Image: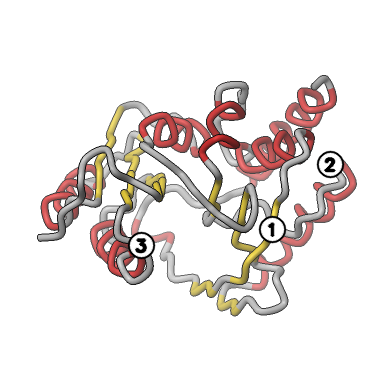
């Protein structure tokens, strides 16, 4: 079993999960395996966002195998933003040396993507909308891989209001407004979700909700 020295953490990784019982145990253990190759003092905070399946049980199973993994679970479902805020509040430390924020980007020229064309169109469309609304020098805000310095994210999270998918754009827009340096990194994405197995997937209602939340974020950021 892997061990982690309490209170001596240099990297915290927050992973929100909703109805991911089929994958979360393996994903957490693999994430820990990869992290262990370049950092020794780290933690993975897995947040079960009010799942209706056995996600909490599967996170706990991973936690029992690797003590770098920490479980947080609650009911009811609060949304992606709520889950990430909960994880950040519990994080012991976060560090990234080359920038204030580093985000994984599907639109990075070195990224390798294997996912449906419809998702590609949706991602690019959202990027164009954000470019017009926020003038950010980033190409992708929604990929779930982001690294923050602790002193950057802690104050921002305390001011945020978005609960769902617009959480990502709110945190980046607020950071950019504060003059923080945001860098992008390539990712490799293999889309393997199967809607027939349950769990939340992005539909038209989600798209409409994201648009509404994004407009509200723009209003709030403009007041800063």
Return the residue at label 1. Answer: 183
Q: Secondary structure at mark 3?
A: loop
Identity of the residue drawn at 39% across and 49% down? 10
Image position of 182 with respect to 79: above or below: below
Q: Secondary structure at mark 2?
A: helix
Residue 58 place in picture, x, y as percent: 20, 51
Mark 2 or 1, which is nearer the eye? 1
Q: Quadrant of the C terminus?
A: top right
Q: Earlier in the sequence, mark 1 or mark 3?
A: 3
Mark 2 or 3, which is nearer the eye? 3
Image position of 114 with respect to 35: above or below: below
Checking the image for residue 134, the label placed there is: 2
Q: Quadrant of the N terminus?
A: bottom left
The 10 Å Cα crowd at callout 3, few under 14, some 14 to 19, many 20 or more, is few
Image position of 37 with respect to 151: above or below: below
Identity of the residue drawn at 47% across and 32% down? 85
Quadrant of res 173: top right
Residue nearer the viewer, 13 or 74: 13
Return the residue at label 3. Answer: 39
Residue 211 place in picture, x, y as percent: 73, 39
| CA–CA distance in space, label 1 to label 3 | 20 Å
């Amino acid at each position: 079993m892997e061990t982690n020295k309490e209170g001596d953490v240099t990297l915290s990784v927050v992973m929100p999960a909703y109805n991911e019982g089929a994958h979360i145990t393996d994903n957490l253990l693999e994430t820990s395996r990869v992290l262990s190759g370049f950092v020794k003092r780290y933690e993975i905070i897995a947040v079960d966002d009010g799942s209706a399946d056995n996600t909490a049980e599967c996170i706990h199973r991973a936690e029992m195998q690797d003590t770098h993994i920490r479980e947080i679970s609650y009911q009811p479902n609060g949304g992606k933003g709520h889950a990430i805020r909960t994880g950040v509040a519990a994080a012991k430390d976060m560090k990234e040396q080359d920038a204030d924020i580093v985000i994984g980007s599907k639109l990075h020229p070195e990224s390798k993507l294997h996912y449906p064309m419809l998702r590609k169109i949706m991602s690019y469309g959202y990027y164009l909308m954000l470019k017009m609304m926020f003038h950010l020098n980033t190409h992708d805000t929604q990929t779930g891989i982001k690294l923050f310095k602790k002193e950057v994210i802690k104050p921002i999270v305390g001011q945020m209001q978005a609960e769902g998918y617009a959480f990502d754009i709110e945190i980046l827009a607020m950071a950019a407004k504060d003059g923080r340096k945001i860098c992008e990194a390539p990712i490799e994405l293999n889309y393997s979700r199967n809607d027939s197995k349950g769990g939340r997937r992005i539909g038209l209602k989600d798209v409409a909700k994201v648009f509404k939340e994004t407009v509200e974020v723009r209003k709030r950021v403009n007041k800063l």
